[in-house]
Image: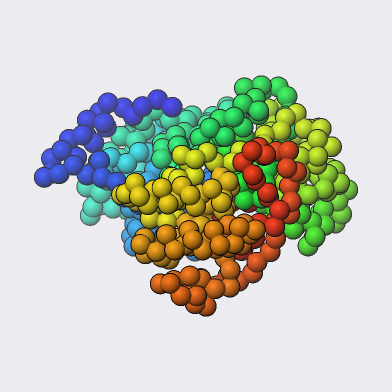
Amino acid sequence: MASSNSTIQKQIKSSSSSGSRSVVGLRKKYDYDVFVSFRGPDTRNSFIDYLYASFKRKGIVPFKDNKNLTKGEFIPSELCSAIEGSQIFIVVFSKNYAFSTWCLRELDQILYHVLVYGKRVLTVFYDVGPSEVRHQKGSYAKAFQKHNKSFKQDLEMVRRWKSALTQLANIAGWDLRHKAKHAEIEKITQEIRISLGDKFSGLPKDLVGIASPLEELKERLLLKLANEVRVVGICGLRGVGKSTLANVLYENISHEFEACCVIDDVSKMYKSNGPIGVQKQILRQTLNEEHLQVLNPYEATKLIRSMMRHLKTLVILDNVDQIEKVEKLGVNRECFGAGSRIIIISRNEHVLNEYEVDGVYRVPLLNWANSLQLLFYQKALKCDDITSHYERLARKMLQFTHGLPLAIKVLGSFLSTLHISEWRNALDRLNQRPNKNIIDRVQSKYQYYNGEIQPRSAHHRYVEQRYIEEYPLHMYPSDRGFNPSFLMFNDENTASCSIM
């Protein structure tokens, strides 16, 4: 995508520097990522629907006129607010765009935000050439002949519309005539992701020790091999961060695929609806089909293979406890197009090996530095202002967690309920029950506070407790004394931690 014409850039610079302060550099939270201006009868049931579907797959939030706002002489305040609350604009020029005074008023508002606030606008020429829009020729000339007659009392507004068309048509955009619309939509979507910047780049600030595992997992995927379909497994103890790692990976690489699908809990969905429930989710997410009429798993498998075999697809199947469940889905390498990647997440490595994955990534425990950072800065104190004395106390407490993120977060949540002067008593309490693990000790029925045993308050009482299944010990170093069996946790804390 080429940059905007130098003339409009100069106007942006001039507009933003003329006031007492620059508004271009201001950062604000937007309601929408994108506002699309288009003439419905020309594009709504074809190009625009596919564009919105692509936005949905890639996590881009557009403004959509779902209320069928009544077309009138003036743009309703709701639409003005949507334009103001959008970060990027897309203008889709079609043959009859200029006949719509509604579209022209939108265009006038969009240009205002581009010139005054420095927002970015992308132009798409659907079935009309840039020159026809820029110089108001052909159908655009006919449209303005009509407007000159209809708005004799406000020719200044008509002149402003023509100027807006000229300025925006000068911006290098996508000329879709004689081109495959699907491929161009993917390019437009990718350009928007790049423009949105921080939303899709980098790592979440609240995650610790994720950068190295993310890069190692990417290496297993061999993303540069575009001609083959690759299957990679992720395994590790529950609470070590398998799902979190997969979610971060998705945010980093999903834009490289034509279709994407994430099944958060295959085992749970399988118990509720059987294999067809999972298959329907795959079809709904990848094809953006909300109301699928699929009667049985065989029919769903045929549909997946026929619809997906030419699409470069990313599929993530989380919490797979039995290989038979994946096999009954009919989801395999032959279902998807070249360059596709299938990621299977399981606590049990033998499940992944039975499926004959191309590689397995074992999510590691946190090292001491990352464990300390997670405890101090994310959970217990939420700051980096701590004395060496309390750091020594925290290090002693961390010996009970063995680098398991969930255990560290539970410990941090417990310490955050105490004044820092009570940490010594908390450590003594942990040492008093050497045969129980850290999560069991912290999440007991009673809490230690001010030297007394007191019932836990409603705020701290856990809704449900259960035991984590034992995972093969060979994955973890024996010299760290790690015993993963009977680690107790609660659903409420797990949800807030977003790790499984």
The residue closer to the viewer here, 30 or 43, is: 30
The residue closer to the viewer here, 87 or 490, is: 490
Q: Is residue 62 visible?
A: no
Residue 55, placed above or below residue 313: below
Residue 321, percent from left and from top: 78, 49
The residue closer to the viewer here, 4 or 279, is: 279
Residue at 28% in and 53% down? 151
Residue 72, placed above or below residue 38: below
Residue 361, placed above or below residue 347: above
Residue 421, percent from left and from top: 35, 62
Residue at 81% in and 54% down? 276
Colour scheme in use: rainbow
Which corner quadrant holds the N terminus?
top left
Total marks placed = 0
Residue at 64% in and 69% down? 464
Residue at 56% in and 51% down? 400
Q: Is residue 383 visible?
A: yes
Which residue sits furthest left? 20
Residue 197, percent from left and from top: 41, 37
Residue 100, percent from left and from top: 41, 50
